[in-house]
Image (cartoon, rainbow, N blue to C red):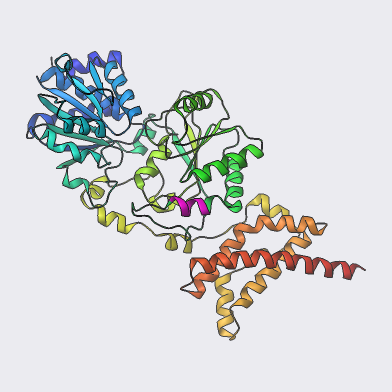
Amino acid sequence: MSHKDTSIEIEEKKELYSYQLGDIDRIFERLDNAPHNYHLLYQLPTGGGKTVIFSEITRRYLAQHKKKVVVLTHRIELCKQTSKMLKGFDVKNKIINSTIKELPDQDEYSCFVAMVETLKNRLNDEKLQIDNVGLVIIDEAHYNSFRKLLGAFKNAFILGVTATPLSSNIKLPMYENYSELIVGDTIQNLIDKGFLAKATTYSYDVGLTSLKVGINGDYTVKSSDDLYSNMVMQEKLLHAYSEKSLGKKTLIFNNGIHTSLYVYETFKAAGYNIRHLDNTTSNEERKDILHWFKKTPDAILTSVGILTTGFDEPTVESIILNRATKSITLYFQMIGRGSRKLPHKDNFTVIDLGNNALRFGLWNDPIDWQHIFKSPEYYLESLRDDAEIESNFKYSMPEALRKKFSKSKDISMDVNEEFKFTVKNNLKAKTILEKSLEQHATMCVVNTKDLLSARKLSKELNDDIEYRIRQYCICLGNVTKNYRSWLIEDYTLKLTIAIGRIYRLQIMEEL
């Protein structure tokens, strides 16, 4: 049976789109003409249907060759989903999980689905051997665990599939294991063709210089928890949600369990419908939470590293990145959870609280994946660091907050100009902060009726204070993170005192 005939047959069972069929043909051109042990990598955005594509590839391959197919995943949930999809393409398959010790019935199956670690352990036991394998498909190929199994399939064609062809370990670049990359359609093209929902991104500037980078190249959980668990960040998150995602089904991604639990308590106290999920949640409770999330229109689910892969809930309307990451793979995985298109859903919201869009670009921006595949080190070195990103921040008071200071004509300060003035006039740099404090304190007193209200209003200046301190530190140069943090705390304390002083003077004048 020809490629065209089998495609039509499957289209009647499971719709295959034109871009998917085109990529399948490109992959089969390599399967048919490259060496039998060729290593090919295929990229397609999250939501583009990678599982559908390699299921059809498996079906066609088995129809044309008298060899077997092995599909490797890195999580048990993906094993189950992959097996189900393959069955939808009439591919009889067997899952090799922890309960499978031997394969006495292997002749009954032409396709096996397994987790990398599980299969490695079984092969090491020498009790399990899959004979006559011609094609190995590796899902989420950017993970490096599959390298452990390459020796067991030296004579098979290896097809890696990923949305982001950048290794999770920079020391193990993907070009060392794959000879070629085939790039699928872009996110923007899939949006334009109606296959993916359009994302509207709202970025909130966040100071990240307190974060530390761990051995894996990403921000550590502890430093992230320290930053994102504080009251200022919790208030910023709550404000961002109420401003841009109120009433929408929302996924909140965090870097640490402590942060996610704080988010849960903050939103719960504010009266919002929220649940928390992490890798310590029992299977039964997780199942209950995901069922609740699916059925509840305004549900908010805060989570930690568990819903980035193997989770598909098309009704998600809003994604909140309540974390920063240096992993472009994670960035795309998180946003991709909201990109599924539905008849009544053409758009979704992304709230970025980690400067991620400034680091990687918008989710639908064009990316040269061939360049990243061939020169990953150069790409990673070219990413903007936090100091550079933050040096370009320009604070603009939100309109709703500006109304609360309507009686104040001047609410801004150019810290750079003020610094030049101090240098020119041989003044101490701290006079800049003293002037800023006086302005902020006066703004709070003038726009309120009592001392308590003035001090309460001052809490809403946190973003402006953080911005001014950051600019001040840039002017000083070589300022430590601890010193900058101390300056913010000291400023906040002095602001409270200054408000009390100005309020008392105002009372005295009225007398």
Residue in the foreground of this view, choosing between 394 and 194: 394
Q: Which residue is pictured at 29% across the width and 34% down the height?
A: 74
The percent coordinates of residue 96 (x first, y second) are: 25, 24
Q: Which residue is pictured at 56% across the width and 76% down the height?
A: 419
- Asked if residue 219 lies left or right of residue 180, the reply is right
Residue in the foreground of this view, choosing between 3 and 286: 286
Task: Pick out the residue farthest to the bottom.
Answer: 426
Q: Which quadrant of the structure image shows residue 443?
A: bottom right
Task: Answer above or below: position of 159 versus 63.
Answer: below
Task: Pick out the residue farthest to the right.
Answer: 511
Q: Which quadrant of the structure image shows residue 381?
A: bottom left
Q: Which residue is pictured at 52% across the width and 70% down the height?
A: 473
Task: Answer above or below: position of 56 versus 169.
Answer: above
Looking at the rendering, the stretch of residues picked out in magenta corresponds to 221-226
The percent coordinates of residue 83 (x first, y second) are: 29, 21
Task: Answer above or below: position of 228 versus 84.
Answer: below
Q: Name the image quarter holding the C terminus.
A: bottom right
Q: Name the image quarter holding the N terminus.
A: top left
Q: Is residue 242 magenta?
A: no
Q: Which quadrant of the structure image shows residue 101?
A: top left
The percent coordinates of residue 107 (x first, y second) are: 14, 15
Residue in the foreground of this view, choosing between 21 and 137: 137
Q: Main secondary structure of the magenta part?
A: helix
The percent coordinates of residue 295 (x first, y second) are: 53, 22
Give the number of callouts: 0
Q: Which residue is pictured at 50% across the width and 49% down the height?
A: 353
